[in-house]
Image (tube, coloured by chain):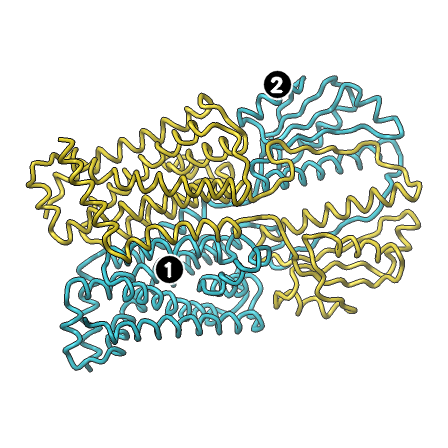
């Protein structure tokens, strides 16, 4: 039995790696994408272009504007002198934000009246707009404290001291990189499995496979192992890149991490094979891969928290193996979560994997044309 | 005339394998429904732990500000340890601590510290929470000063105005972005297999010996899928407008002209993949790699392109979805701003010509 499986595994590896194009596609792009996406996925604003509209000639407003210039989040690209200039700048996306101080800004501030700083933000990407507003608020708060301290102003009767656990500088890249490890791992399993059975069906070689002494279970194992091995190898390389290239801290144990990876690969390969065995043509296999992969990523909590989703959709995410894998990745990487706390994430992945394999195995036999 | 025959053959192939029709019509409905309702960045009812070591009138006044806020779903603890355990277990995302001597310190010149501990794993949510906590804290300060007839030392007040999306409704920018992602998938999926299928089955050679020129072959592949894709687009745009109530401030014809241009580009990319790959298997793999993830992560749909490092920004220029996301977000939310639409349309035209040029070159000299 092992000899037969081994022969099939060998054949699968050959079909995957024999063709030069397929070999390149399987190894190059996922690793390159890891690097590009690793740099692209961040919510930390850098050099957001903004314009200053300062009607005030006093010292106070100039000092506040200088605080914006000093922030790494913003870079001043224009200075405007009347209101009509605001709209063209923002409409054409030359600036994302205009900071406006009125003519009485310094006088108000000195007289102890509230001085108004108007901030106009381009809301076409409302998330970026919200991040801009947060950064502006931080600058204004810091300025207010400094002002109060140097002008014998009374400090407010209370102040907030903030601490962040697990990620003291709140670097959003630390949050996204483990997610990208998950996404690329999913991509690799889909690359290897989603079209494999469909191709054999379309070319008619699957029927030949079925009349060999191989039992469906053995075919299943033979089809699974290559995806599993390639996925494991690429996941390891990606994790090395995350730790040594991007310097994401790996707090937890490798054993816990690899338990998660193995279970996720099991479920990913299982779903891939299931899609592949439902499909009659490779085009259908490809469609199936997308129908699975796109929701699996968007609903996994990768970029938008699951908590924000409506309850019905939150229920759907329970079927998504990525959802559990992301918690494992982030937990092990950033929080150093121990094995036993992650068991609630492990068993659903195992369950999804086993169910998908059972369906795939059943389809091997019962879907014939 | 010859072209008509080829288009007819292609249409027959579409009708006989329902997966193309599923790609064009079912996929946009399914994905938009799921994401339009599912994806949101608007955090409300954030679970938060309020640690009050010694309850009194001052602390309950403070807590009222949090109970009234729609952003928080606070639960009260009497010591930090329990709250920290709750955060470890993921039950709360942040802890606000009022120490034992809160009331006393409030009356001292240095003021009372309010400690905020956030779970930094999701840095973005952590920042949002920190902003909301400051908001609630500010409300409480105002109330506190007002009640005691004190004048709060007012300094710079920030007044924010968000153009195009005043309530910061994240659906307004996510839905146009999703339309771009979905159209990328439709475009590439429809054509990624069609040329490689002809090569794999050997029917391409049969096509080559007909009087059809390569240009006609490519056009014959393009026209039917373009019609199919536009059908999907009309569906997606109607859902955005009528179901998700995204405002359309530009004109409809600009929206459709831009979309048609993008669809041609996306189909061109699919044809190129299909031509380069030669086998359907490799074409499928290439489509998986080059379509969804780049359109999702590098198009400016979620992550701001301006904040990426220079090299990555340069790479985004070859992602067609980048131009389309800019056009869609502008036409939907801002209006017909030609200074945004024209350069991005030009980007699409250049990409499309590159894709079709490469497809044509690679097909011509192919026979071995």
Chain in cyan (letter): B
Whole-Å distance between the Cαs marked 2 and 1?
Answer: 51 Å
Residue B250, placed above or below residue B111 = below
User: Does residue B133 appear to the left or right of B204 in the view shown?
Assistant: right
Question: How many numbered badges does the structure rendering display?
Answer: 2
Is residue B191 visible to the viewer in this orientation of the structure? Answer: no
| Marking on residue A153 | none
Q: Nearer the viewer, residue A350 or A254?
A: A254
Is residue A326 visible to the viewer in this orientation of the structure? Answer: yes
- The chain letter under disc 1 is B
User: Does residue B186 appear to the left or right of B5 in the view shown?
Assistant: right
Pointer 1: residues within 10 angstroms few (<14), some, or many (20+)? some
Could you confirm whether marks 2 and 1 are on the same chain? yes
SS category of the residue bearing label 1? helix
> Residue B227, how many percent across, how many down?
31, 68
Q: In which quarter of the image is the N terminus of chain A?
A: top left
User: Does residue B351 appear to the left or right of B88 in the view shown?
Assistant: left
- Give the residue drawn at x 45%, y 61%: B321
Q: Name the residue under label 2.
A: B82
Residue B359, placed above or below residue A214 = below
């Amino acid at each position: 039995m092992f000899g037969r499986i081994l022969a099939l595994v060998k054949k699968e590896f050959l079909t995957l790696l024999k063709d030069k194009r397929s070999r390149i596609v399987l190894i190059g792009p996922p690793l390159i994408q890891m690097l590009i996406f690793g740099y692209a996925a961040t919510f930390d604003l850098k050099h957001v272009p903004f314009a200053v509209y300062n009607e005030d000639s006093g010292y106070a407003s100039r000092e506040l504007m200088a605080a914006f210039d000093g922030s790494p989040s913003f870079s001043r690209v224009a200075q405007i002198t009347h209101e009509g200039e605001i709209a063209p700048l923002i409409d054409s996306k030359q600036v994302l934000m205009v900071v406006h101080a009125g003519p009485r800004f310094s006088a108000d501030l000195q007289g102890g009246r509230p001085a108004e700083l108007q901030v106009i933000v381009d809301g076409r990407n409302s998330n970026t707009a919200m991040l801009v507003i947060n950064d502006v608020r931080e600058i204004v708060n810091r300025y207010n404290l400094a002002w109060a301290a140097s002008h014998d102003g009374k400090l407010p009767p209370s102040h907030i001291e903030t601490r962040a656990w697990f990620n003291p500088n709140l670097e959003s890249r630390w949050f996204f990189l483990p997610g990208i490890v998950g996404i690329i791992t999913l991509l690799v399993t889909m690359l290897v499995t989603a079209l494999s059975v469909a191709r054999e069906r379309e070319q008619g070689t699957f029927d030949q496979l079925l009349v060999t002494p191989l039992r469906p279970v053995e075919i299943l194992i033979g089809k699974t192992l290559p995806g599993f091995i390639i996925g494991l190898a690429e996941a390891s390389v990606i994790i090395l890149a995350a730790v040594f290239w991007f310097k994401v801290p790996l707090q937890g144990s490798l054993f816990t991490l690899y338990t998660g990876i193995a279970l996720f690969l099991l479920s990913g390969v299982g779903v891939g094979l299931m899609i592949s065995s439902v499909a009659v043509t490779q085009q259908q296999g490809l469609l199936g891969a997308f129908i699975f992969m796109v929701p699996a990523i968007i609903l996994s909590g990768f970029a938008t928290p699951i908590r924000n989703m409506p309850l019905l959709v939150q229920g759907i995410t329970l079927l998504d193996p990525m959802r559990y894998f992301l918690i494992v990745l982030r937990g092990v990487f950033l929080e150093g979560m121990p094995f036993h706390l992650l068991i609630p994430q492990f068993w659903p992945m195992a369950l999804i994997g086993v169910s998908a394999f059972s369906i795939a195995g059943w389809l091997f036999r019962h879907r014939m044309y | 005339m010859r072209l008509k025959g080829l288009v007819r053959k292609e249409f027959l192939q579409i009708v006989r394998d329902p997966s193309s029709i599923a790609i064009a019509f079912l996929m946009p409905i399914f994905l938009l429904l799921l994401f339009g309702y599912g994806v949101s960045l608007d955090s409300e009812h954030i679970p938060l732990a309020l640690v009050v070591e010694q309850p009194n009138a001052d602390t309950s006044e403070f807590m009222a500000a949090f109970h009234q806020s729609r952003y928080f779903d606070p639960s009260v603890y009497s010591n930090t340890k329990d709250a920290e355990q709750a955060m470890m277990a993921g039950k709360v995302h942040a802890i606000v601590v009022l120490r034992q001597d809160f009331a006393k310190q409030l009356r001292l010149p240095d003021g009372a510290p309010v400690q905020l501990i956030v779970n930094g794993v999701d840095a973005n949510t952590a920042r949002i929470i920190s902003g909301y906590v400051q908001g609630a804290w500010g409300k409480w300060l105002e109330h506190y000063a007002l009640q005691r007839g004190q004048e709060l030392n007012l300094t710079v007040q920030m007044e924010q105005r968000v153009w195009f999306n005043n309530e910061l409704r994240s659906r307004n920018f996510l839905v146009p972005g999703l339309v771009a992602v979905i159209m990328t998938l439709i475009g590439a999926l429809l054509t990624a297999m069609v040329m490689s299928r002809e090569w794999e089955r050997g029917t391409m050679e049969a096509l080559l010996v007909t009087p059809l020129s390569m240009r006609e072959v490519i056009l014959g592949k393009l026209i039917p899928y373009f019609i199919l894709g536009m059908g999907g687009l009309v569906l997606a745009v109607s859902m955005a407008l009528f179901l998700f109530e995204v405002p359309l401030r530009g004109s409809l014809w600009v929206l459709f002209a831009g979309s048609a241009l993008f669809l041609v580009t996306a189909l061109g990319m699919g044809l190129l993949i299909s031509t380069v790959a030669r086998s359907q298997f490799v074409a499928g793999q290439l489509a998986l790699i080059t379509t969804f993830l780049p359109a999702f992560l590098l198009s400016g749909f979620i992550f701001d392109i301006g904040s990426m490092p220079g090299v990555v920004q340069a790479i985004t220029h070859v992602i067609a979805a980048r131009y389309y996301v800019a056009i869609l977000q502008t036409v939907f939310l801002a209006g017909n701003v030609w200074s945004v639409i024209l350069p991005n349309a030009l980007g699409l035209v250049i990409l499309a010509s590159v894709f079709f040029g490469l497809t044509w070159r690679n097909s011509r000299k192919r026979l071995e």
